[in-house]
Image (spheres, rainbow, N blue to C red):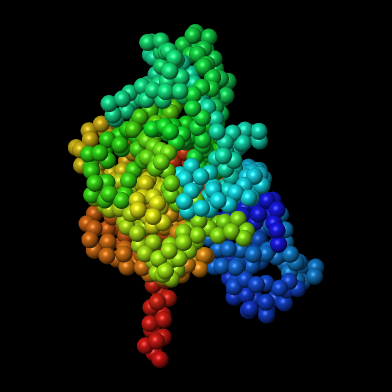
Amino acid sequence: MHQSAKQIAENATFQAFINSYLKEVDGGHWMEKSQWMQEQHPTITLSGESVVEMELPGQSAKFAVEVMYRSRTGRHRLGCALKYCDQSRGWIPQDRLPMMIALIHELHLMATSNGCHELASHYDELVLRLIESYQTMASYIEARMNDEKSLYSENSTFLEAEQSLLFGHWLHPTPKSRQGMAGWQHPSYAPELKGRFQLHYFQLDREMVMEGSNGLKRASDITLHALTKRLPHLTVPKHACLIPIHPLQAQWLLQQDHVKEAMEKNLIKDLGPMGAYYSATSSIRTVYQPEEEWMYKFSVPVKITNSLRTNRLHELRAGTEIANLMDKLRFTEKYPRFRMIEDPAYLTAQFPGEKESGFEVIIRSNPFPEGKDKGISNLAALVQDPLPNERSRLSRTMERLAKSERRNLVDVSRDWFEKYWKCSIEPLIRLYDEHGIALEAHQQNSVLDLTTGYPEAYYYRDNQGYYLSNSYRDTLHGLLPSLKECPELFYEDALIQERFTYYLFMNQLFSVICRFGQDDLMSEDRLLAWCRQQLTRLEMELTRQGKTFIRHILHSEKLSYKANLLTRFHDVDELMAKNEQAVYTYIPNPFTLVKEEENYAEAATAAV
């Protein structure tokens, strides 16, 4: 049956929201479908493997959701929704949007009854963002319904992969929430709609400008060179400097009093849009031009998922410091399949009394220029759900490899996964063990070189995601003394391990395992068992914080989990909170669950 864009978006929103609720709020009461049908006698026939019931005591209500695929590591695939009707004493079909709103209302009732003052209820904000995200997603799907090639082809370019995330964050209740971006602006600035736009330039008195870089070139020279390649006759006074700004941010800046005053004094000139046309990458605020050597990461006045996306002053410095540090560590020489996309330069303007002025620009290296951009994909694009009647990018890749190599899908999948582990997961753990550096390596920050079909290299990106261990502080300061000026980069290991657990395992690794399972390529249990073997080997080899971290992953009954639904419900902007702290919770550890089941199976076999 053909589904409309609205139906597809509603289903995708429902999948993300209910999975978030089950993980963060109430795990529900699970039953095998056959047993549930036998006990409940519903009038509707279910085809899933399980049913999960959810009680809403605050509203004296009860829902049931059909589960088509139950995942041990990631997101369950859900079917129809039912509500228990007291009047008829039976189950009736339930529309999905009203059910999600009822669950948000239940959260509100729970928060108010618990006297939750520090993390107050913002259920109206969550309802607003839920609907806005759903409507935005529907418009993107409508525009891309027949764009199968650039959405799912394993030979697509870096930019095509960046523009393919129609459903967004796999476990976020409002994955396409973009408050602050008007409907008419999406075609230009939303990556999903393949928009292109010129950057907006301001000319500032050089005394107002603060810049930094770790190379031979000044940041202002990098941006000017990129512009004059297109506009060779452009001249800039010696006392002035040009700063490129995202057009959305430029509109916001022009309304700020400190900018207006500087313009009245002729310290700032608005030059408007100029130069090459750029495209938004998956984060919206990092922009890419295939012919340019550099990308730019801007502040934008838009709330994307949890946060208003602004570059902070300490993040500007962090990019140059980490680029210097990684150069000194030579880690990527030791592990050549692991790479960092550096943010080695920055520009901003300083105003009296303003810590951040809104002009903050991060300059990012571009390892994927035209000609070197084929077969490059962020991990989120690889594992996201496909549109109805399509296959995921990962599934298509496995099928093509199996056909060309004349091997079965399980063998190809195992080899692919092993290469992925070796270039991604293991180096990330070793970096933490050897140098005390943990990275916020979630799916969208993780980019794979898949030019051969197999993972040939892993690239990490994002200068907001560096965690340096306090226990390595003296060693790192000795290696790079300027790190003393960046105390914000250092954290206690307890907090690092909480974040690292979520980003590396929950968000990145488990999404890949879940995709293999949902696509019937390889079972989740088999992949978990293999990962546990690798982690056991690593635990024996490593000697410092990596060893402690792995021991925690292997043996803890529960693991930390970033609760995006609760973060959104309490309206926490994690980028502005202390330690950039979202709401975290704990969920059962898939590694210990699988081990327990294996032990039970062995015991049962021995008894027979």
Q: Nearer the viewer, residue 454 or 532?
A: 454
- Across and down, in percent, residue 392 comes to 53, 58
Q: In which image quadrant can residue 558 be found?
A: bottom left
- At horizontal 30% and vertical 34% (from top left) the residue drawn is 321
Quadrant of image for the N terminus = bottom right
Relative height, residue 523 to residue 436 (above, below): below
Q: In which image quadrant can residue 536 be found?
A: bottom left
Outermost residue toward the top? 265
- Across and down, in percent, residue 309 comes to 50, 35
Q: Is residue 205 left or right of residue 179?
A: left
Q: Nearer the viewer, residue 333 or 48?
A: 333
Residue 382 visible to an observer of this rendering: yes
Outermost residue toward the right? 87
Q: Is residue 78 left or right of residue 463?
A: right
- At horizontal 27% and vertical 46% (from top left) the residue drawn is 332
- At horizontal 34% and vertical 33% (from top left) the residue drawn is 344
Relative height, residue 369 to residue 67 (above, below): above
Outermost residue toward the bottom? 608
- Across and down, in percent, residue 210 comes to 37, 21
- At horizontal 53% and vertical 27% (from top left) the residue drawn is 198
Q: Is residue 58 left or right of residue 206?
A: right
Quadrant of image for the C terminus = bottom left
Relative height, residue 383 to residue 410 (above, below): above
- Across and down, in percent, residue 408 comes to 43, 71
- What is the tally of numbered marks visible in this picture? 0
Residue 462 visible to an observer of this rendering: no
